Amino acid sequence: MKYNFSAAFLKIQSPDTSFGQAWESLCFDLLKAEYNDNSQVRLKAPDRGIDIYRQTEKIAYQCKSNELAKHGTIDVSECIKSLTTALSVRKSIAWDKYFIATNADLSGNGFEKLKDFILKNELSHVEQLGPEFWSGLCEKHIELVTDRLDYRLLVTEQQVISAFEKARYFDKYIKQYTEQISTEQFLVEVRNNRTPLKLKIPFSRELTIENLLDVVQNILQINMGRNNYYDTQTSAQPSISLTFNDSKQPFSKKIKEVTEETEPKFEFWITIVWEDTTKKEDNENDGQTTKIMQYLKMNEYKKGALSYEQRKAITIDRTEKILQSMMWDGVNSLAGA
C-alpha cells in the first residue's frame, strides 16, 4: 500500500474538527472525483449508519477509522452496529450496495465476524473498502490529497543513533558519528521510490553514503531477506541504493563529496530482484511473508497455471506490498502513532 492514513499523516482541516471527520472528508472527495456523481451527499446527524450516499446509484458508505491505522485497529463491532442501523432505515434511505470505508484492515477475527453477520442476515452487496482501495484512489487523484496528507517526518538524533546500533556499528564509531552530527547541525532529506515518505535526517557531511543508507534502511525497517512464494514457485528480495540527482552514489563517498547543498535531497532506491524459482537461504523471510500475505488478503495460485509474465508481475507486486508494509510500520513508531 503506497499511502498510509494514520493521524501522523492525515491532517484535520476546517471545517472538520476530528480525525474521523477528516477521514470521511477524504473518502467523500475521492469518491466524487472517481465517479463524478452529482447526487452524492454526506448525511449528518442523527446517525443512520450511513455517512456518504450516492442517491442515483443507491450506494451507501459508512466511514470507520482509527488514528493508528494499523492492521486490526478497526472496531468490527462498530462496523456491525452501523450496518444494523443502516438496515433499519433502508425503507427511507434505500440502498442496494453498502460499503464500509476503513483506513486500516480488519483483523482476521474481525473479518470473520463481519462475514458471519452478512451471511446470517442474507445480505448481498455489503463489502469493506480497505486502505488498499483508498491508496489506489489517492494515486489516481493525487491533486486532491497533496495538501491533506503530509508525509514529512523529522528524525531525531537519538533515532539516528538507534539506527546505527541496529546496524551493529561498533560503539566507538557510534560515539564519533554522534559527535559529528551534534556539532554540525546538518539535515538531509531522503525520499524513496515506493512510498511518498520524506525523512528529514540530522547527519554529517563527513559521513558516507553507506552510513546514510544504513540509517534509512533501519528507520524504514527494510528486511533484506528473500521472500519465497510457493504457489507461484517464485521468489524476490530487495536491493537498495542511494541516488542524488537521479545518479546512483558509491557507498564509499562522503556526503560532502556528493553535494555542497545545505539540505540535500537523496532518494532511497529499492529495486525488487525476482527469480522464477524458490530458494532456501539463510536470510529467507518466509515467516514475515506469510504474515503479510494474510494481512493483505493476497490470492493463492495453482502451480503451473500462470505464464512467465504473470508470475513476474505477481511476484513484484507482492514484494512491493510487503516492503511498503514494513516501511509504514517503521515510520508509525517513529512518528509516535
Image: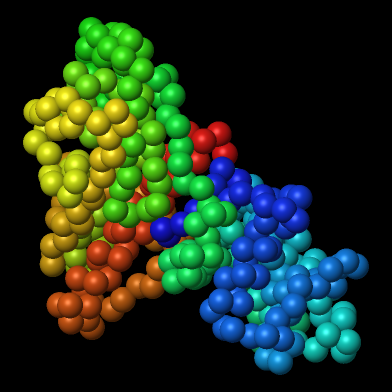
Q: In screen coordinates, is 312 left or right of 27?
A: left
Left of 141 or right of it: where is 305? left
Give whichever of 175, 285 is nearer the camera. 175
Q: How is the image coloured?
A: rainbow
| Depth order, front residue of 1/198 | 198
**Which quarter shows the C terminus?**
top right
Question: Residue 153: x and y, percent?
Answer: 46, 37
The image shows residue 49, relative to residue 36, as above or below, that is above
Residue 241 seen by the camera: yes
Q: Quadrant of residue 41?
A: bottom right
The residue under the point 74% across, 50% down is 18
Residue 201 locus on image (x, y percent): 36, 29
Q: Is residue 316 above or below residue 285?
A: below
**On the rendered image, what quadrant is the N terminus found in?**
bottom left
Q: Can the viewer see residue 112 in this picture?
A: no
Residue 193 drawn at (x, y percent): 29, 53
Instruction: Say which residue appears at 39% left-offset and 33% top-offset.
Output: 200
Q: Quadrant of residue 249?
A: top left
| Residue at x-position 72% and y-position 53% | 14
